[in-house]
Amino acid sequence: MAKFLWQVSYTTQGAQGLQKDGGSARRVAVQRLVEHAGGKLESFYFALGEADVFVVADLPDAKTAAAVSLAVNAAGAARLRTVVLVTPEEMDAATKVAVDYRAPGAAPK
């Protein structure tokens, strides 16, 4: 499974729904969404600032994460930003992958 971070910002409609239903109900709804998508909810926190909610979830793959993002954004009550999270071990493996990259303005090899 892959791990994803969702940064959620409520629209006016979403904030009104939160006031009506409460925070615990939103967590339950997100947990159901994640589990129905074949994943596991790791954490759910409300926040003050640019994002209203931060969620970390394990999902089967990027396709599933994209499907969740489309469904939530299409509903119109929240704007969801999805970030792929990388474990330290995955980063270790990434440091061993050779890539051919030339920075802008750098002389060709």
Image (cartoon, rainbow, N blue to C red):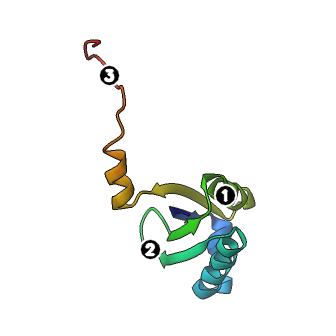
Q: Is residue 77 left or right of residue 51?
A: right
List x then y, in percent, for residue 95.
31, 45
Residue that numbered label 1 is attached to? 64
Sequence-first tag of 2 and 1:
2
The alpha-carbon separation of the residues under discs 2 and 1 comes to 25 Å
Nearer the observer, disc 2 or disc 1? 1
| Left or right: 10 in relation to 77 | left
Q: Amino acid at mark 3?
A: Arg
Upstream in the sequence, badge 3 or badge 2?
A: 2
- Please report the residue visible at 58 percent of the width from the left and 84 percent of the height from the top: 23
- Cβ–Cβ below 8 Å for labels 3 and 2? no
Relative to residue 87, is residue 72 drawn left or right? right
Disc 3/disc 2 C-alpha distance (Å): 39 Å
Residue located beneath label 2 in the image = 47
Give the residue number, with chain letter if any, for mark 3: 102
Element type where label 2 sits in the image: loop
